[in-house]
Structures are given as C-alpha cells and as structure tokens.
Image (spheres, grey):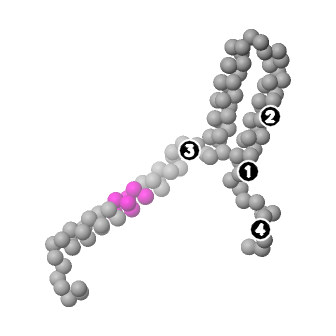
Amino acid sequence: MLNQRPNRGMLKIYMLGSTLAMLGLVGGLVETIFLPFVEQETIEDTPVELMMEKKKEKKQVLKSHTTLVCPEVVDVLETVVIENKAKHLVTAGQRSSANRLHAS
C-alpha cells in the first residue's frame, strides 16, 4: 500500500479528516478562551433554586386554601424538608472515604 501513489479518493478522505480535526481544534480553543466569561450555573445551585420555586408554588396553593389553621407550622416543616433535600443532593456527589477498604 505504501508503494502505491495516493489516489484522488484517498486524498479527499484525508482532507476531510484534516478539516474536521482543525475545526474541532479551533472550537476547543474558542470554548477554552470564552469559558471564564460565560455565566455558569453550578450543579449545587440548580436543585436549590428548583426547590425554592416549588416552595413558592406550595405557598401560593396554601394561601388559596381557606381551611389552613397554622401556616407557620407548615412553612417550618417545608423549610426543614427542603433544607434536608438540598444537603442530601450536595453530599450525594461527594465520595465517602469511610467505605474504602484500602489506602489510596
């Protein structure tokens, strides 16, 4: 195969591959350069924001009901549940060192 001259089809495939590789390289460089300037949502912020939105929706539903006796108690319970869920979500992404069987 090395003794044969490259034909036109192989040259086209080579040029296509080289072009795609260069476009990928340029795209990666542009992404790396603009990464510090882009506003990012962290994984930890997103669940907390969603829980806060759900809390607001629940408050609106509770306010619409007229049979509610003690709204303070319900708000405290909701806040405790939401805080526990948020703590669980934040710690779920971390590795536990207590489960390791050997030193690393």
The residue range painted magenta reads: 22-28
Q: Identify the mark nearer the N-term, 2 or 1.
A: 2
Q: Which residue is identified by label 3?
A: 40
Tell me how far mark 1 sits from mark 4, CA to CA: 17 Å
Q: Say whether residue 58 is left or right of residue 79.
A: left
| Extreme-front residue of the structure | 67
Q: Which quadrant does the C terminus fall into? A: bottom right
Q: Identify the mark nearer the N-term, 3 or 2.
A: 3
Q: Which residue is identified by label 2?
A: 80
* Mark 3 or 2: the one toward you: 2
Residue 73's quadrant in the figure? Answer: top right
Is label 3 in contact with label 2 (beta carbons under 8 Å)? no
Tell me how far mark 3 sits from mark 2, CA to CA: 28 Å
Circle 2 — which element?
helix
Q: Amino acid at mark 4?
A: Arg
Q: Say whether residue 5 is left or right of residue 79.
A: left
Q: Amino acid at mark 2?
A: Val
